[in-house]
Image: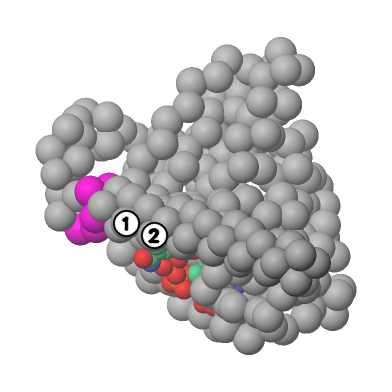
Amino acid sequence: MKKSGTLQLQLKFHFSFNIVSLTMFLVKTWRQTAFGVYGYMNFTKPAFLEHSKNFKPEETEVQIPGKNCIVTGANSGIGYAAAEGLAQRGATVYLVCRNKERGEAALSQIQTKTGNQNVYLEICDLSSVTDIKSLASRFSEKNVPVHVLVNNAGLLEQNRVTTSEGFELNFAVNVLGTYAMTELMVPLLEKASPNARVITVSSGGMYSTPLTNDLQYSESSYNGTLQYARNKRVQVSYIDQFSNDILDSRRVQYPTSTRMVTFKYSVF
Ligand SMILES: NC(=O)c1ccc[n+]([C@@H]2O[C@H](COP(=O)([O-])OP(=O)(O)OC[C@H]3O[C@@H](n4cnc5c(N)ncnc54)[C@H](OP(=O)(O)O)[C@@H]3O)[C@@H](O)[C@H]2O)c1
């Protein structure tokens, strides 16, 4: 009797354990399939070309002289293109780069290509809160309104590296860097009210993983790609919260729009 009771318990446990594993497997498969389809439809080049049919030239070809724009990670890729596009439209652009040589090369290329001399370089390692604080205080000494902050700098480091301030490196750049830059720029964004914008470049990769409390990936075996996806999800969640906080403080009107990999929030 006792033995069959134990057997029943074992079978029950085995059965419910298998149900849990099967459910987790199905949820994971569903998430990956849904992400694959959604990603193909929204984040690929053909998707961009399809969406771009709705772009209105008069909305993209505006001139914005007198607008001060900060672009992080502006020496390459999306950040460089954004900085060049803003300079082309007559804005004053501050390139925030961690490497002096790469930053100077981008600065000179943008000035030459656009003919806009109101483009400046600021050196800052966004994995360091100390460096970001020092950048913010340099900007506050300039005392200029910031109309646009583009949080573009991003990193996918496959190994678990810890910064000198004790943070996991991907988290430090993608999450903490975005957070510190945005929060510390609020006084200057407020100076540009009601026309300030914070644009944070996230990634469709965020759909591959749910939010987690383990922000620095210290509770399980490290996976750099997964940490990047987690960071990108946290970035969007933070910016959403940031917009809500600003809205709650009634300093703003709040249109939001989500386009491609760029999540654009109007904060003032
Ligand atoms: N390309 C894509 O398919 C794609 C897709 C989805 C999302 N994104 C996102 O788009 C953004 C730009 O990516 P990208 O593709 O243009 O890549 P990228 O060319 O590698 O640009 C990344 C930029 O971030 C800078 N950066 C990295 N760590 C930094 C730090 N500690 N301090 C300051 N700057 C730092 C890099 O500077 P260095 O040159 O000095 O390294 C570089 O300028 C990222 O946020 C990325 O997550 C890209």
The front one of 138 and 213 is: 213
> In this picture, is 230 found above or below 181?
below
Q: Residue tagged by mark 1?
A: 33
Residue at the location (52% across, 74% down)? 225
Residue at 46 percent across and 42 percent down: it is: 263
Total count of labels: 2
| Quarter of the image where the N terminus is located | bottom right
Point 72% across, 17% down: residue: 248
Question: Is residue 122 visible in this depiction of the protein?
Answer: no
Residue 70, position as x, y percentages in the image = 57, 50
Tell me which corner region of the image, top left, top right, bottom left or bottom right, holds residue 254.
top right
The image position of residue 131, as x and y in percent, is: 79, 66
Amino acid type at image mark 1: Thr
Q: Check disc 2 and give the amino acid type.
A: Thr
Binning the other alpha carbons within 10 Å of mark 1 as few (below 14), some (14 to 19) or many (20 upward) gives few
**Which numbered disc covers residue 29?**
2
Would you say the residues marked 1 and 2 are in contact, meaning their CB atoms lie under 8 Å apart?
yes
Residue 41 inside the magenta-drawn segment: yes
Near-viewer residue (32 or 82): 32
Callout 2: SS: helix
Label 2: how many residues lie within 10 Å, few (<14), some (14-19) or many (20+)? few
3D distance between C-alphas at marks 1 and 2: 6 Å
Q: What are the residue bounds of the magenta stretch?
A: 39-45
Q: Is 212 located above or below residue 182 in the figure?
A: below
Q: Which residue is at the front of the view, 146 or 235? A: 235
